Amino acid sequence: MPELPEVEALAGYLRQRAVGRRVDRLEIAAISALKTYEPAPTAVAGRAVVDASRHGKFLDVLFEGDLHLVVHLARAGWLHYREAFPATTPLRPGKGPIALRVRLDDGSGFDLTEAGTQKKLAAYLVTDLAAVPGVVKLGPDALAADLATFAERLRSRRGQVKGVLTDQSVLSGVGNAYSDEILHAAKLSPFAITDRLTDDQLAGLHAATRQVLGDAVERSLGQRAAELKGEKRSGLKVHARTGLPCPVCGDTVREVSFADSSLQYCATCQTGGKPLADRRLSRLVR
């Protein structure tokens, strides 16, 4: 799932490549992906791309006249920038992974695609960001929050720190992958309870959040959209590395599986050497 660093990099790439170009047309291939009906997609035609930015994990492409195309890429969505499209024929709804396409006046543009069968990519064409439910509910940006704000937000929601850290209404931008990385850097169990964290632990978690996300953004900026997934994988120390040695201590990276997701951690670095039990089989070790 694209998270804060990747969405920030995609916005940066669009600022470099698309800003100043006018839209030839916006085509919708997956009707279910467009969550708004007013303004109509035809309203984008002829407008210049003014800016591209990010709200948590939402990508926001701004067109002149204060018209926003706001996109949540969900788990399997991505943006593919094309220097030229192979054909000018309109997209056929329901065919292939493309959800929508933005064609620009120089022949370039970008596709928003979604792999797999669970189609959850969501696009909103709005003149007011308050019309995007997910944006309205976002908590403070995880990379921008100062220590006082970060600590207050974490303590406002009692629960396992992994789940609270990825709750977008608490702090926005962190998902499954970077939460594993942040907790590893902070040397915290993913199942530590937020209201039991000490001031020192919260300060360490805040520092780890800024370090992990900041480093990922720095690595990602300037990369082409097609290179970002590989760049993300290359920087991971525990996430998606089950069975491999921890690059910090050499212990084997372990996994806890859930119904539709999993987490990875290092027992030596994070849980005092105690393996966490799989939630499906027994009680969690805290």
Image (cartoon, helix red, strand yellow):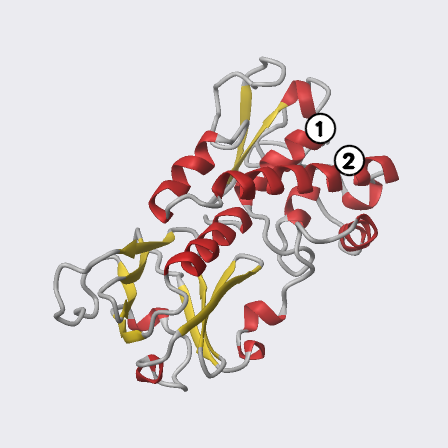
Which amino acid type is shown beneath numbered disc 2? Answer: Gly
Residue 162: tell me if it is visible: yes
**Which circle, 2 or 1, is nearer the viewer?**
2
Position of 48 relative to 225 (above/below)? below
Binning the other alpha carbons within 10 Å of mark 1 as few (below 14), some (14 to 19) or many (20 upward) gives many
| Labels in figure, total | 2
Position of 241 relative to 260 (above/below)? above
Residue visible at 48% across and 50% down in the picture: 9
Point out residue 130 in the picture as x, y percentages from the top left corner: 58, 78
| Residue occupied by mark 2 | 204
Residue visible at 38% across and 51% down in the picture: 76
Mark 2 and 1 residues: CB-CB less than 8 Å, in contact?
Answer: yes
Report how far apart the C-alphas of labels 2 and 1 lie in the structure. Answer: 9 Å
Residue 41 is left or right of residue 244, and the answer is left
Which amino acid type is shown beneath numbered disc 1? Answer: Lys
Position of 143 relative to 232 (above/below)? below
